[in-house]
Amino acid sequence: MKMVDDMHHHVRWRAMYAVEEFSKYLHPELQNNYNQKVLPALTKAMDDFSDSKIQVQAAMATYHFVEYCTSNMLEPHLDEIISKLLRCLQKGKQLLKLWALSALAAIAKSSQDRFLEYYRTVMPYLKVVMTKAEGESNSKLLSATVSCITAIWTVFGKDKFGDDTQQVVQLLVSTPISNLEIHDPMRIEGLRAWGRLCKCLGHRFQPYMEVAIPCLLQSARLTLPDDANVEESDERNRMIQIKTETLEEKATACVLLRDCVAELKEGIDLWIDEVAETLVPLLNFYEHAEVRIAAVLAMPEILKSSKAAIEKRLLQKSPFEKLCSDIIPALVEALVKEEVIKISAVMLDSLEDCLELSGPVLNIDQIKRFLSVIMDVLDTSISIPKVDEASEQGEKVSKKVCACLKIFMKTYKGSLLQFFDQLLSRMEHMWVKDKTVKERKIALKIFTDVVEEFREEALKFCESELLLLFRACNDDEPEVQEVAAHGIGVAAAFGGSIFKPLVGEAVSALNANISDSMALHRDYIKAHDAAVTALGQIYLFHKDRINASEVFSTWLSHLPIKNNLLEVKIAHDLLCSIVEISEDELLRQDFAYLPKIIAAFAEILWADDETLATEETVNRVIKQLTDFKSRLPSNIWSSILSTLEPSRQNVLLLSLSS
């Protein structure tokens, strides 16, 4: 009989274990097919106090299974499963209690608001376990209970748990983390509890900051023990464990500091200097990537907090400009040293945000350093082979460099003219024919941004670069063609008198692109659309230097464009601008162009989702159509409408009637 019982025990335990493992890989859509049988079986197994091993395995399996359930899947089983978990908390041994706590937190997360009706039932049990664990100095159970309670609170937000925070806060206040052993689980869980309380309470967390923020700062400042003179293997293993635990705590504290700053915004202003002084040096903390990433992500949040405090005229210890002038150079220097391309991408994200927030806080030497570093980072990202698994991150880095450069040029416009040679020499090196498509695209993109920002002033230095742009408009690679055509449009719009002598060559380059036999092929269509837009910009800004009727006719014949979403809104707004300034002329020319213009307007209105035009452009289209209708003879108006598809006629008439 005993052998049968043992076999029965083993089979049940393996079944619980199988559910636990199976649930980790089960697709959520399939989970509902199994939970009608699995959850009742798990709750039944947790009720078997004659076999603690089965109970523990059932609680573990419950935790893993409910993590992937939706609230609708769990709702029929909540009464039973919560009841059994609470019984485990009452009568179970420590390991069972630990897994029951994890399972309750997972259920709260998965069931969301459905768990709210159980909150008042569950919380007294959790408080009893917490009080008892505190009295017995049981760190594992205490930390697990605090984790469960605060995890439940984060599900419900700021206003659902009333005064329940007081007992947890008193516990955290009376248990200074610095007094605990480094391996005590309550050290990290105490930090996480403060972070969750901040998230739950929002600005109501401010009374607790005097305890919470110094606690987080202290853990973020932890230093690693020196094991240089340790020789014995046991002692070395112990030192490795201490280092691991120290790094985990340090990383946790850095993440939570960033979260607190993001949550409290101007409310944390009195602490913002200390947070910055703690986290800025950690941009170069190479012993642990998570510490570095947390520090990087905190930088924009620190600036947002300081800026919000100034805007709300709160008392601040440190001026916003000082923080900007500390943080931006520190990010730049960290970028130089960073060897992990994924973290470089994160740094550039933060740098972009910080540049957006700050004004011109860098001096000339720092500006020069920024440009040097950012171009070196660009060179590194471009050199990553496409087959390399880091190439996707390299692409992101390249795009982020361009974004940072664009903001930088706008911010430091008055100081950058002296650095044109530094920028353009790199560009010239990158866009020659033997370079990769990616290099040539990026070079053209940066050159276009320079022209857009500095306009005629830039083009004084760049006539030879413009000729390269015209040639690139008919490059073998469609991606290069697209960027070059866009650049020609920008140069036409902003190049003024410097661009005028080159208008003929620009039109020839664009016409060659548009009329190419492959222009409407799916690989080339975006380049075609960019060239069409650029031709419209040349017509609008340099009409006096071209065969206007020929260029206008060519341009109009390709409208509306629909495939390049970066260009379509520009092109169709251009159409409105050209029609507005040419309306009288268009009405005098035997109405030759009006059918095509009205057909293009009808297509723009038909889209009805702002893919082809902004709301402002749509309003301009409707106004111009209204003008045409009022000024054209009725038979001409009717004749033009009759050439449109019925669906386009209807949408046009509906727009005019409304």
Image (cartoon, rainbow, N blue to C red):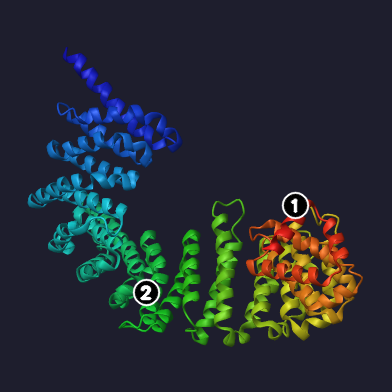
Residue at the right extreme, as displayed: 590
Mark 1 in CB contact with mark 2 (< 8 angstroms): no
Residue pointed to by mark 1: 647
Tell me residue 257's x, y (percent).
Answer: 31, 66
Query: Circle 2: is it few (<14), some (14-19), or many (20+) Cα within 10 Å?
Result: many
How many numbered marks appear? 2
**Structural distance between the alpha carbons of marks 1 and 2:** 52 Å
Seen at 49% across and 75% down, the residue is 355
Q: Is residue 55 left or right of residue 511?
A: left
Residue pointed to by mark 2: 305
Relative depth, front residue between 527 and 234: 527
Q: Is residue 146 left or right of residue 36?
A: left
Quadrant of the snapshot with the C terminus: bottom right
Q: Amino acid at mark 2?
A: Ser
Per the image, label 2 sits on a secondary structure element best described as: helix
Relative depth, front residue between 657 and 572: 657
Residue 69 in sight here: no
